[in-house]
Structure formats: structure tokens, C-alpha cells
Image (spheres, rainbow, N blue to C red):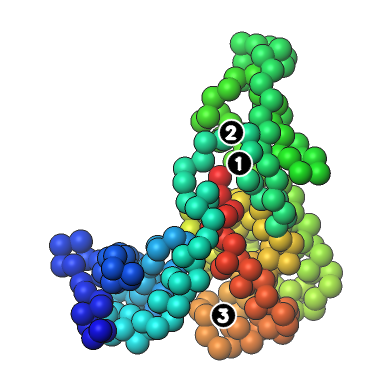
Amino acid sequence: MDSRKLITFDNRTKEFNLLYNERLIKINVIYRQRKNISIRIMPKDKIDIISPKSVSYSFLKDVIIKKKDWILKTLDKYKDINEEFNEERKFVDGEIFYYLGKEYKLKVIYDKNILNRNKNYCYISLDNENLIIKINNYDKELIKDEIKKWYKFESEKLVMDRVEYLKNNNYIISTLSPNIIKIKEQKKRWGSCTSQKSIYINSRISMARLDVIDYIIIHEFCHLVHMNHSKDFYELVKQIMPNYKNSEIWLKENGYKLII
């Protein structure tokens, strides 16, 4: 099929449509203050094209057409992913949550006698295979909020520990100093670095493997030198972490599972 028929533009929604397996998949256009164009594909069938504000839709369509084979190949790779992670969380026994790259099954223990029954209390811990929640008010939103708080707390500890480790074991990292490093809730980004040299790390990062956590930290530290994703930027990442590609690939393939 002609690529121009495979990819169409909807003037009403300002989105591209890609014909894939007899279905139309939306490609969201995101304009940002940046120099390069990038395409982000996330399970399942979620595609963004991120572009500088000055670029026309016509030019973006040409970019998508040029990258068509890669887009279709990536969509094929994601077609057999675990559907459990594409549904809204129910926060019930048996749901899978990740911590440091390992799977844990959620186990909710309701105990109305935990401390004062008139107040909401929640205790979270890990054993060999379970993420255990002891709670005195079985409320889905309460459980969700408490799990978010727990992962953020764990992420803060891990990131600070890994930054200290990396600074002590790598000369390049030891010479780089952000203004702040802050853990915050982010929907799509695992990390970001502002022009003011502030680094923000996703509060779910403790779900990822340790080497992936290191990669995300290193990636953002390298933005203190190169505020782009140029060849020089990735050369610097490679100098610090020669096998960073392995961590990058794991995150691309498993990032959709790291959800709350």
C-alpha cells in the first residue's frame, strides 16, 4: 500500500492516523521547545511524535512515512504484551507490581483493629514474592495513594544512594552538579533536566532494575552538559555507562509494566 494512504492527517483533531492490522491508530502530535523530532511508541498502540514548534504537519507526515517500517516493526513487537498492564488497576490480591525489576504479587490484608479504627492506617512491606498491604479501611483510592507514597519514598532513598555511588565511582559524574534532584510523579517521562540544571526523576523509578535506575540518573546528568539528544550526548552517556543500551532496551520493553 502507498505510504501516504497508510498515514493520514485528521485536520479536526490535529492527529495522524496510521492504518495497522486494519485498524486506525492515532499518532499524537506534541509540540515542545526543542531542536529535534522524535517518535515515541508505548504499549499498547500509543504513538507520539514530539517536535519543535516551528515544524509543519506536512513535514511531520514525511518523517512518519520515512520511519514507517520501524513504527510497524515496533507495533508488531508489542502486540503480544501482557494485557493486564493495560487495564486500570483494581488493587486486589494477585495483581503484579514491580520493585527493582522483580515481580511481586499484591496481598491486601484488611484489619480494622490497626491502631485507631476512626483513622485510616496503611502499612506496606515486601516479602519474597508479595507486596503486602495491611490496611484498616479497604478503599481503592486509599490503597492507590498509599502505594504511590511508598514507591516515592523508596525511589527517593534509591536515587540518593545511587547518585552518591555513581559520584564515588565515576570521575565524570563526580564533576557534574545539578542545582536540585527531586523525585516527582510523572506520567510519561522517567527523568528530565531543565535549563536551570534541575533534575527530576519519576517517583516510580524504584520499580525498575538497579542498572536501569543508574541509566536514568546518568542520562539526566549528561543533560547538564548537552541539553539535547545529539551524538555528543550519547557519547558522553557511553563513556560513563558503556553498556547503557541494555538498560535502555529493558526500559523500552518493560516500562509499560511499571505502573500504579
Q: Which circle marks residue 95 in the picture?
A: 1
- Distance, label 2 to label 3, CA atoms, is 44 Å
Q: Nearer the viewer, residue 160 or 158?
A: 158
Name the residue that disc number 2 marks.
92
Q: Earlier in the sequence, mark 1 or mark 3?
A: 1
What's the residue at 60%, 58% (across, down)? 201
The spot of residue 245 in percent (x, y) is 65, 78
Q: Are marks 1 and 3 in contact (CB under 8 Å)?
A: no
Look at the image and tell me whether residue 110 can be seen. Answer: yes
Q: Say which mark, if any, is on residue 35.
A: none
Residue 168 drawn above or below residue 96: below
Q: Give the structural element (helix, strand or loop) at label 3.
A: loop
Three-letter amino acid code at the position of disc 1: Glu
| Quadrant of the frame with the N terminus | bottom left
Q: Are marks 2 and 1 in contact (CB under 8 Å)?
A: yes
Determine crowd level at label 3: few under 14, some 14-19, many 20+ residues with C-alpha closer than 10 A. Answer: some
Left or right of 124, for residue 93? left
* Rendering coords of residue 88 (x, y %): 47, 43
Real-space Cα distance between discs 2 and 1? 6 Å
**Residue at horizontal 18%, vertical 67%?**
10
Q: Considering only order in the chain, which callout, 3 or 2, is on the residue closer to the N terminus?
A: 2
Residue on which disc 3 sits: 226
Q: Residue at x 58, y 33 (%)?
A: 92
Q: Position of residue 31 (x, y in %)?
A: 33, 69
Q: Front-most of 5 and 256?
A: 5
Looking at this rendering, what residue extends furthest in the right direction? 168
Mark 2 residue crowding within 10 angstroms, few (<14) / some (14–19) / many (20+)? few
Label 2 sits on what residue type?
Val
